[in-house]
Image: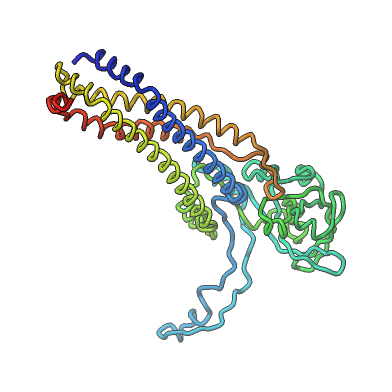
Amino acid sequence: MNSRLIFSIARLLLVARWRQTLVAAVGVAFGIAMFIALLGFMNGLNDLLDGLVLNRVPHIRLYHEIKPNPIQPIELSTGHQNGHNFISSIKSGPAREAIYNEEAILAAVRKDSRVLGATSRITTQAFFNSGVVHISGVINGLDVAGEINLFHFKEYVVQGNVMDLKHAGNSIVLGKSLAALLLVEIGEVVQVTTPNGNRFPLKVVGFFQSGLNDIDKVQSYVSVATAQKLMSRPSNYVTDIYIKLKDIRRAPGLAKTYGDLFHLDAEDIQKANAQYETGSFVRSLISYAVGVTLLTVAGFGIYNILNMMIYEKMDTIAILKAIGFSGKDVNRIFLIIALTIGIAGGACGLLFGFLVSLIIDSIPFKTEALPTVETYPVNYSLLFYLIGAFFSLATTYLAGWFPARKASKIDPVIIIRGK
């Protein structure tokens, strides 16, 4: 049968029952809009929570781990090589924490096309003296420029100028919660006692807030040069090399490669922060499940509407088949009706979903725990819109296919005789 005629009949049936058509299209639009808004908001929240971890930790960390020597002296004795040696209460001996040839390692790593960047660090325990009270903490010696470029350090310094850490000697940035415990303000001096007993005055030039209170209670930051001075170490002393990759999924394999190549202990982010991947996956799974449920419910609504339309149009279908329309033609008519509803409703749903996302993205959201966040987070990934468009067509096609199949099998003689 002529395609133009089939489209014309489908249009007439849509207009004749325009209220039902409108309800079906609104159902699709609502489902798609909520799907887009929900996925955008949930994944924006995912990105925010993951960023609290990913922005502050390396993909690969190279260091020397303090551990017992795997080869004990008795095993080197020629008189005991043929026996089984049982050794208990093994203690860790003096270990070298410093990384030798740090400049050469950094140069080699940075040449790797898979690496985004690398920087060195010094990490040491310390005591902050507040009167007669000693508050334990951790001092991190940073390459300030590298930390800003790779780990967004500047974004988390909520008060003070982060570059003072680089240009002013004997300066420190304190975690905001640690500063509150010490009752110090920017410009004041704190007394720091190192593990080897040295005591140094350091000027506070800023406050750091990561959003994780347990971290902000103990962490503080100085330049690499200041950390070397605190520990009475030479200018080439570093304890860690932090590496960021272009693709985080390569971290486990590259960590093993670098560990073997440079004879260092290597820890990848999946091993150090396994919980963040689990939480991210579960949250994404929930958001997709709810979104698909909304689309499925909208599909059932279209199915019911088309089913009722067929029952109400039995005589029309019978006449169409009596004048020469085949069952395949009738099937195409009702599939066109369903897909028209899906396309119109889906397009409106994508638009309204985007507008709802913009509204959510503009709502103020300020909390001291998350200093870098000003509004509710939203992810505008194109993938969500493609999924929404696909589901709007798929659900409406399936919702229309079953009633259309039923309509194509109607016997016109039975319908006309009944009338």
Q: Hey, which quadrant is residue 45 in on the image?
A: top right
Looking at the rendering, in which quadrant would you find the C terminus?
top left
Quadrant location of the N terminus in the rendered image:
top left
Q: Look at 51% across and 29% down and name the residue there.
A: 352
Please name whichever residue, 104 or 296, is drawn nearer the observer in this view of the structure. Answer: 296
Residue 166: image x %, image y %?
76, 45
Q: Is residue 118 left or right of residue 70?
A: right
Q: Which percent across, then down, holds residue 190?
A: 84, 58
Of 141 and 82, nearer the camera is 141
Q: Is residue 53 left or right of residue 367?
A: left
Which coloring applies here? rainbow
Q: Is residue 414 above or below residue 68?
A: above
Towards the viewer: 290 or 28: 28
Please say if 17 is above or below 292: above
Q: Is residue 57 left or right of residue 229?
A: left
| Residue at screen point 41% across, 32% down | 28
* Picture coordinates of residue 386, whole percent (x, y): 42, 32
Tell me residue 381's x, y (percent): 50, 35
Q: Quick check: 201 left or right of 65?
A: right
Q: Quadrant of residue 402?
A: top left
What residue is shown at x 21% (from left), y 13% (from top)?
2
Which residue is drawn at the image coordinates 87% and 53% (left, top)? 188
Give the total of numbered labels.
0
Q: Which image quadrant is residue 347 in?
A: top left
